[in-house]
């Protein structure tokens, strides 16, 4: 998949701008997500990689407004560009896109006197919509697949009933037969045998449960599916199957995916673009292949080198010294500087902004003082970073 | 050098320990309120009788007198000072109540933890016994037992212990069953720890909050049960306690005569002390289960954005 | 530490010619399942079926498998937290008596286990000093508080938790995941074991600190000549960490040998499946996700009614009729490699 250049606004689906999410606790505020901006194009798979405290899950929940107090969105916008015309949807097989409930373009009812969400590709700020509009957006346009399917499925309802439940809630005009048919279609789409329509979650294996969750997410043909560590609890083989399934479905139905995980090696194979998060901020964003070949931020380099290689020469690797910061005590300046082998004076003082690395492609961005356009020094090469990391590892005992 | 640092460390640990106790007491408003009430009664129990000038058992000539300057809570039918009786009775009720509560806790802990940890036949036997004691109505059994043995506070205490341990044992057994499969228990086994050390030093410290909450509710029940038994006359009628005040006032038809100042004070004391314990219990519950906590209202305007 | 027996009578192909320190032969573990019908056929979870391997001092062996493969059960049997249903455990050549008491205590001094979850393997109400002090006291390495403290500090320094004094009085919730796991390793080292069984020691840690912990274990292995068993589902970290690898599927051992050889040239179909399914960014093709279909689909079978014969046969693209009839025996492929697969022979003859 060629990486999408989102400069063409017609293909932008989601535009997150300067999002801030805080957790208000008795002993202070924790900034879980700080000033995060990115764009998601149609049919794009965006990977969000990070470790604990990076804010990636909080971000996912913020986009769908599923956060509960004490978490609060304290700033930013999330602009969602709806499809202008159903014909935009590319559908190569007979699996039909479900039309919207009032038969026209997906247009929210203009009940509360708010500005009409016209089906002309105009943007709507998800953070500002009314609960009614939000409900219409949810699952119709925006679906989320949670981390452990075992917890997301209702143990006392069969999986078929859960799919049909979603349909009943959002498509009141569908009759029971067409609901059932749709549920069967969905199960077949994700690779579950149709005779499992009446099976309960505990009768299915882990991989099948995760697939059922994906089927439920796809029930209303959403535009965006957010997946929060969907395969972490699964075995490697099942994980591979599910990921292949997701790519295949994406090609067929052309939805976009925000894939959140700590496993960067997965994203390198799966995602078109990858954003790396650290301590609540995006520190680098690049196309998947580009990130693999030429990581720019020292954290990206370190993270990439925390995954031992399956083939190729065996050599001693050392990960990144230290550990991810406690969000209650984030280091000043660049949050990564205490662990960074290439840190210098400015790193502990000034916060580096996200800047494009090259002039041709404004989508490759990195937040690091080493890439300051005004600085005289050459930005470090891979070899430089490797040498610095090794020196750090040699110096400290393991 | 080592000696100095050891004592510094020891005093720091004491300080840390005291801080944690203070933290526990000021957990939330309920706990603070309850603790204040219980602390008040404790102080009265310990120091009260030192300040009483009048002997609660002396008969005076001021018979059936309503509250006045001379007798703050009036006198009984035989001229005994009710206030003095209350204060002295507090000591008896509190100490026997706490002591019996402690005894009940010890029995529940031993039975609950042992049967929960070992499982198998041991568990079956202990559970059977526990269930039997749970099913038998406590108060009637207590009455039957107390009427067989010589009257006195000790009998009351023993009888209540025998009938009151089962509930706590049940609860602790359930908690222990889930604890024993935790990795740190397995790690302790793999390190070669003896079984009894695992039960009392590894598992029990993790159940302290449960034990504390249980102790509080148990003591409450103990005080009520003791008062009930004494009211019936199964306690030691010649000693002074809240329950015996009930006994004597009932036997003297105080209600009919209208000597309200004889039985209302002990009733109020029991109710207040019970409320104190109950408040502590609610407070612990609230802390333990986050869903019961009420969020202090924060920046209401911004809340709209985050909530679905 | 005892002086190792360096005699040339090597049990298996061990380049440093040592005797194995811990061996298990034909291990079988069945967990009983509650019967609804007491008169019916006894059911059980057949967690481990005929496992045999050896651990050598100074060598790391990886045990790779997915969930339900039986790898954790093997570790717990080796740590004698479960007793085997059948099979022999040998420590330094002598069969281990399966009794409790003194012999169990001695065994535990030599074989220690590190758990997967650093958050639950430490008791939240006790300090680091308590955790390290208990094994020191139990096994008589320390007789009073001063010795305990001194040795605890030494242990903390060995696992690179410094400054050590600061960590002694900390509670587990005050430590990060990596620090907790280091404390767990220090606790295991306190009894001066000969064998360390690490059950997925880094799976629950942040990615960037996993290598630190693995490197620590490797350093300790070299310094103390420990025999390490590294249990994992991540075959890439098995390659990084261990000289030898054993692959398990649904309770059966399917392949083993020097790690790099097994990974570069897997023999058993399940091993091939595992390797092709593992994420490998170096293998990026033109369309990002390697579109070559996996050689097999399906999921791990139930262990209560496992498939007959070779348990992989329902999913195996090369299954033959004999695969469902009999369990394949171990076939030596030379150079320390072996596999249990009818494609390569049946029993100890060198197959094709």
Image: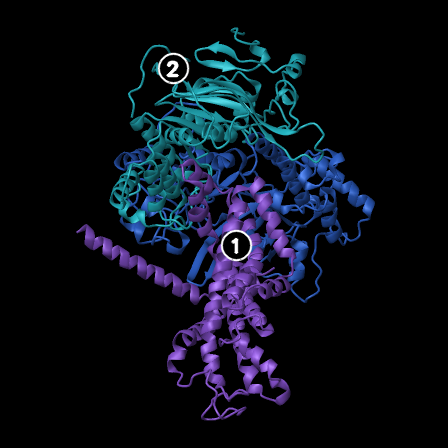
Measured as percent of width and height from the top left, residue B236 is found at: 52, 72
Q: Which chain is cyan?
A: C
Q: Nearer the viewer, residue A111 or A279?
A: A279
Picture colour for chain A = blue
Q: Pointers 1 and 2 in contact (CB under 8 A)?
A: no
Residue beneath disc 2: C14
Q: In the rendered view, does A108 fall on the left or right side of B225?
A: right
Residue A75 visible? The answer is no
| Alpha carbon distance from label 1 to label 2 | 56 Å
Measured as percent of width and height from the top left, residue A382 is found at: 35, 34
Residue at point 66%, 29% (across, down): C43
Picture colour for chain B = purple
Residue B108 is marked as 1
The chain ID associated with circle 2 is C
Name the outermost residue toward the left.
Answer: B1
Q: Between tags 1 and 2, which lies in front?
A: 1
Residue at point 59%, 71% (across, down): B228
Q: Is residue A315 above or below residue A62?
A: above
Measured as percent of width and height from the top left, residue A298 is found at: 36, 40
**Element type at mark 1:** helix
Q: Nearer the viewer, residue A54 or C219?
A: C219
Q: Quadrant of the C terminus of chain B?
A: bottom right
Q: In the rendered view, does B196 fall on the left or right side of A392?
A: right
């Amino acid at each position: 998949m060629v990486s999408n250049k989102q400069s063409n606004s017609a293909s932008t689906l989601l535009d997150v701008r300067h999002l801030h999410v805080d957790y208000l606790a008795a002993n202070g505020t924790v900034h879980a997500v700080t000033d995060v901006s990115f764009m998601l194009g149609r049919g794009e798979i965006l990977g969000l990689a990070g470790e604990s405290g990076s804010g990636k899950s909080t971000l996912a929940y913020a986009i769908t407004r599923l956060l509960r107090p004490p978490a609060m969105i304290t700033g930013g916008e999330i602009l969602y560009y709806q499809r202008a015309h159903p014909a935009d949807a590319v559908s190569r097989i007979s699996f039909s896109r479900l039309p919207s409930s009032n038969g026209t373009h997906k247009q929210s009812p203009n009940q509360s006197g708010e500005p009409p969400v016209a089906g002309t590709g105009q943007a709507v700020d998800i953070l500002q919509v009314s609960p009614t509009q939000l409900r219409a957006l949810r699952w119709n346009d925006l679906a989320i697949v949670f981390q452990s399917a075992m917890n997301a499925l209702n143990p006392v309802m069969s999986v078929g009933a859960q799919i049909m439940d979603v349909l009943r809630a959002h498509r009141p005009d569908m009759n029971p037969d067409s609901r059932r048919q749709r549920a069967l279609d969905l199960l077949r789409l994700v690779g579950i045998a149709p005779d499992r329509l009446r099976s309960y979650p505990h009768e299915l294996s882990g991989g099948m449960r995760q697939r059922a969750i994906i089927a439920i997410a796809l029930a209303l043909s959403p535009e965006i599916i957010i997946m929060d560590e969907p395969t972490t609890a699964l075995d490697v083989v099942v994980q591979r199957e599910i990921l292949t399934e997701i790519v295949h479905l994406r090609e067929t139905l052309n939805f976009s995916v925000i894939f959140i995980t700590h496993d960067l090696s997965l994203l390198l194979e799966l995602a078109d673009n990858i954003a790396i998060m650290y301590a609540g901020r995006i520190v680098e964003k690049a196309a998947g292949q580009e990130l693999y070949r030429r990581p720019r931020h020292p954290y990206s380099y370190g993270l990439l080198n925390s995954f031992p290689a399956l083939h190729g020469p065996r050599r001693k690797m050392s990960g990144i010294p230290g550990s991810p910061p406690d969000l209650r005590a984030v280091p000043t300046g660049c949050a990564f500087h205490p662990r960074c082998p290439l840190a210098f004076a400015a790193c502990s003082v000034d916060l580096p902004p996200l800047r494009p690395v090259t002039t041709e492609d404004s989508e490759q961005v990195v937040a690091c003082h080493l890439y300051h356009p005004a600085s005289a020094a050459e930005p470090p090469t891979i070899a430089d970073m490797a040498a610095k990391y090794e020196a750090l590892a040699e110096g400290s005992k393991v | 050098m080592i000696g100095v640092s050891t004592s510094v460390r020891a005093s720091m640990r004491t300080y840390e320990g005291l801080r944690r106790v203070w933290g526990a007491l000021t957990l939330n408003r309920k706990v603070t309120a309850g603790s204040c009430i219980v602390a008040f009664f404790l102080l009265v129990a310990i120091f009260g009788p030192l300040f009483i000038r009048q002997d609660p058992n002396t008969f005076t000539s001021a018979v059936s007198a309503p509250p006045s300057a001379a007798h703050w809570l009036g006198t009984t039918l035989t001229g005994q000072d009710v206030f003095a009786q209350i204060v002295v009775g507090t000591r008896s009720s509190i100490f026997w109540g706490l002591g019996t509560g402690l005894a009940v806790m010890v029995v529940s802990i031993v039975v609950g933890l042992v049967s929960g940890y070992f499982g198998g036949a041991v568990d079956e036997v202990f559970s059977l016994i526990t269930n039997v004691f749970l099913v038998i109505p406590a108060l009637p059994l207590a009455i039957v037992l107390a009427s067989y043995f010589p009257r006195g506070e000790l009998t009351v205490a023993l009888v209540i212990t025998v009938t009151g341990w089962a509930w706590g044992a049940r609860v602790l057994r359930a908690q222990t069953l889930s604890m024993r499969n935790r990795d740190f228990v397995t790690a302790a086994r793999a390190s070669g720890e003896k079984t009894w050390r695992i039960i009392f030093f590894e598992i029990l410290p993790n159940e302290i909050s449960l034990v504390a909450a249980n102790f509080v509710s148990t003591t409450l029940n103990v005080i009520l049960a003791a008062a009930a038994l004494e009211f019936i006359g199964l306690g030691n009628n010649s000693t002074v306690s809240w329950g015996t005040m009930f006994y004597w006032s009932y036997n003297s038809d105080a209600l009919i005569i209208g000597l309200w100042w004889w039985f209302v004070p002990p009733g109020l004391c029991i109710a207040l002390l019970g409320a104190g314990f109950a408040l502590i219990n609610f407070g612990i519950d609230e802390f333990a289960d986050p869903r019961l906590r009420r969020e202090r209202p924060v920046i209401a305007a911004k809340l709209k954005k985050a909530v679905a | 530490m005892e002086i190792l027996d360096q005699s040339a009578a090597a049990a298996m192909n061990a380049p440093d010619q040592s005797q194995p320190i811990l061996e298990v032969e034909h291990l079988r573990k069945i967990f009983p399942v509650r019967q609804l019908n007491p008169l019916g056929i006894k059911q059980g979870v057949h967690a481990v079926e005929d496992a045999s391997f050896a651990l050598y001092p100074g060598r790391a062996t990886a045990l790779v498998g997915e969930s339900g493969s039986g790898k954790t059960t093997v570790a717990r049997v080796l740590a004698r937290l479960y007793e085997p249903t059948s099979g022999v455990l040998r420590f330094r050549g002598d069969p281990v008596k399966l009794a409790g008491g003194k012999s169990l205590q001695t065994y535990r001094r030599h074989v220690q286990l590190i758990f997967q979850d650093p958050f639950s393997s430490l008791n939240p109400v006790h300090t680091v000093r308590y955790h390290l002090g208990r094994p020191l006291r139990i096994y008589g390495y320390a007789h009073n508080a001063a010795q305990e403290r001194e040795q605890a500090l030494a242990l903390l320094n060995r696992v690179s938790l410094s400054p050590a004094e600061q960590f002694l009085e900390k509670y587990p919730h005050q430590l990060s995941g990596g620090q907790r796991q280091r404390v767990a390793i220090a606790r295991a080292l306190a009894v001066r074991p000969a064998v360390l069984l690490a059950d997925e020691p880094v799976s629950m840690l942040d990615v960037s600190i996993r290598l630190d912990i693995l490197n620590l274990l490797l350093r300790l292995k070299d310094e103390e000549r420990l025999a390490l068993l590294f249990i994992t589902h991540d075959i890439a970290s098995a390659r990084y960490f261990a000289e030898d690898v054993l692959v398990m599927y649904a309770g059966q051992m399917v392949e083993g040998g020097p790690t790099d050889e097994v990974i570069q040239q897997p023999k058993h179909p399940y091993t091939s499946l595992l390797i092709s399914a593992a994420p490998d960014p170096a293998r990026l093709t033109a369309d990002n996700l390697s579109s070559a279909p996996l050689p097999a689909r399906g999921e791990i079978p139930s262990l209560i009614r496992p498939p007959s014969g070779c348990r992989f046969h329902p999913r195996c693209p090369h299954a033959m009729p004999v695969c469902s009839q009999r369990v394949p025996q171990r076939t030596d492929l030379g150079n320390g490699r072996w596999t249990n697969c009818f494609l390569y022979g049946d029993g100890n003859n060198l197959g094709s």
